[in-house]
Amino acid sequence: MATAHSMEEIDDRRRDAALEHERGVAFVHLPLPSPLVLMPQVMRVPVSPHTPSVSPGLPGTGSLVLVPPAGRLSRILVVSSRRDLEETLRQLYERDGREVLSASSSTGIVEMIARAEVELVLCDLAMPEESGVALLAALREAHPTLAVAGLSIASDAGLTPSIHEAPALSGIPVLRVPVMPAEALALVQQAERSMGSSTGLSTASGVTAPVPGELEVADGPTIFRGMTGSTPIMRDVFRMISRVGRTDVTVLVTGESGTGKELVARALHEESGRRHRPFVALNCSALPSELVESELFGHTRGAFTGAVKDRGGLFEAAHGGTLFLDEIGDLGAMAQAKVLRALENGEVMRVGGTRSTRVDVRVIAATNRPLDVMVADGRFREDLLYRLKVISLALPPLRDRMEDLPLLATRFLQLFATRHGLPRRPVSEGAWTMLRQHTWPGNVRELRNVIEGALVMCDGPEIDVCDLPASVSRRLTSPPLEGGLPEVRVASGATLPFVEARERALREFDRAYLRAALARHDGNIARTARALGLHRQSLQKLMARRDLRPEGRGLTAEL
């Protein structure tokens, strides 16, 4: 029978536990029937990557169960400035054998979720000077598989509908306050069932919301693990992720810059049995070759100038989880050899070290370079390429899936309107035309940035052509002008940097084009705007940006 112990004895046992864990021993904590501060019964078992239910954490106290069965939500975060509410939920969930973390504001929450391995977030919708709805939207965007819910008291009733008015937040349940223990436990249990059956969390009205990671209806828009697409080629990508993700094979993701290769890597991780373990990413092109090895494999003290202490690498940090190597074509020859050894033998050796360390890591690599050509040129190891591309997954550029552009743009508009606290504005027909005509060399990343910038710059009732950057809106279409399009002289700018020269040429084109169009309509802004497919206010804003102003029947330009 368990007996009460002093806090000093418990602290001693915790220190012993830390030492045992460093020697490769984990602790399995057995539940205790009493809420008093008791010494937990402890059973020592060897740490093994094949025992995912064993937690490497330190022993707790009371009835807290630190090693839950598979599919059980073990760590919950409560975001609320109301101390009484946070304490009520803490006591309730800890008695149910769960760990509860708390935060009094939303600052830094999105970034810390993965590090803290939080599985459910309960967010107060009535925090002063903060938007709980905005935090939930940001969490859904950054962590699509994370379970989230709102907290609302009777006097906050006006806030509750707002969570369902935002399309990006549809299906998020709201727990009523004062908290009823049965309702609070039912919400967590429903989240656990959704983890196993993918049926989703029930909303306050009893409607079941789909889990973000699941494919929706076959003939409608699809959202899968934070990615949007309804074209056949994207549906094939989603199906392959779902099929391959549950295995441990290495995957090589190929595609142009901005197509979403890291999103795919994260989706593969979330689909796997490693989803509750670390996801570690490295852009191999972002570091000099002499530093990449130290970053990946770690180093010993004195291995090179500045190595003042031993340091583990990313392979060790990702133990039990997934390591994503972006732009792997930029790895040097020595690093390629070490990555190959890690893949084949599951061992890494720190720079300057003499002993190998066993690691259990799934590697997902990505590149926008032709590795086959690099192999032929001797710049990439052939054996490493074969080891990486057990499964090869190619992502299409946005220009090959333009049917998805409205879905993506609409989703980004909803996301950034919520994030920046801006009204959700529609997109004009003229702006849609510009978006469809653009070739999108930067793919989905470029579209995301364009939509965010346009939403921020827009001060009218809708997003118009003049709110789009020049790189997109330069493809302006209108009835042909007499004498054809104006000639733009670029020879004088040939000595400038390309971006600056292009911007200058676009500015000259806009000015010449607008001057010719206004002259054709005798300087009448309203008629000119109708002919160009613009709103009057949009044309006036565009003229102001290009330092043009109407005067009488003509147009004067102050150069």
Image (tube, grey):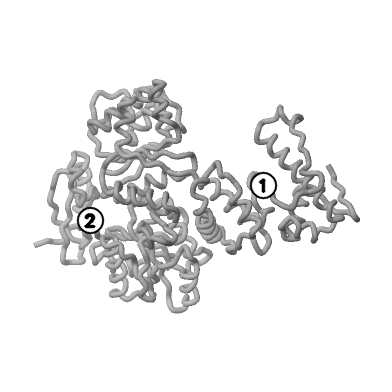
Q: Name the residue under label 2.
A: 66
The crowd level at tag 1 (other Cα within 10 Å; few <14, some 14-19, many 20+) is few
Image point 84% across, 52% down: which residue?
A: 520
**221 lies left or right of 56:** right
Residue 396 visible? yes
Alpha-carbon distance for marks 1 and 2? 59 Å
Question: Where residue 36 sits: x, y (%)?
Answer: 20, 65
Q: Which residue sits furthest bottom?
A: 154
- Classify 212 as above or below 56: below
Give the residue type that dot 2 points to: Leu
In the image, is 433 to the left or to the right of 260? right
Residue 547 horizontal/vertical position (percent):
80, 48
Q: Residue under circle 1?
A: 475
Instruction: Tell whether 377 sits left or right of 39.
Output: right
Q: How many marks?
A: 2
* Mark identifier at residue 299: none
Q: Earlier in the sequence, mark 1 or mark 2?
A: 2
| Helix, strand or loop at mark 2 | loop
Quadrant of the image containing the N terminus: bottom left
Q: Residue at x 33, y 65 (%)?
A: 200
Q: Which of marks 1 and 2 is in front?
A: 1
Q: Do the residues labelled 1 and 2 touch (CB within 8 Å)?
A: no
Q: Where is residue 195 in the image (x, y as percent from the top left)?
A: 29, 60
* Amino acid type of the residue that numbered disc 1 sits on in the rendered structure: Arg
SS at mark 1?
Answer: loop
Q: Foreground residue, 44 or 448?
A: 448
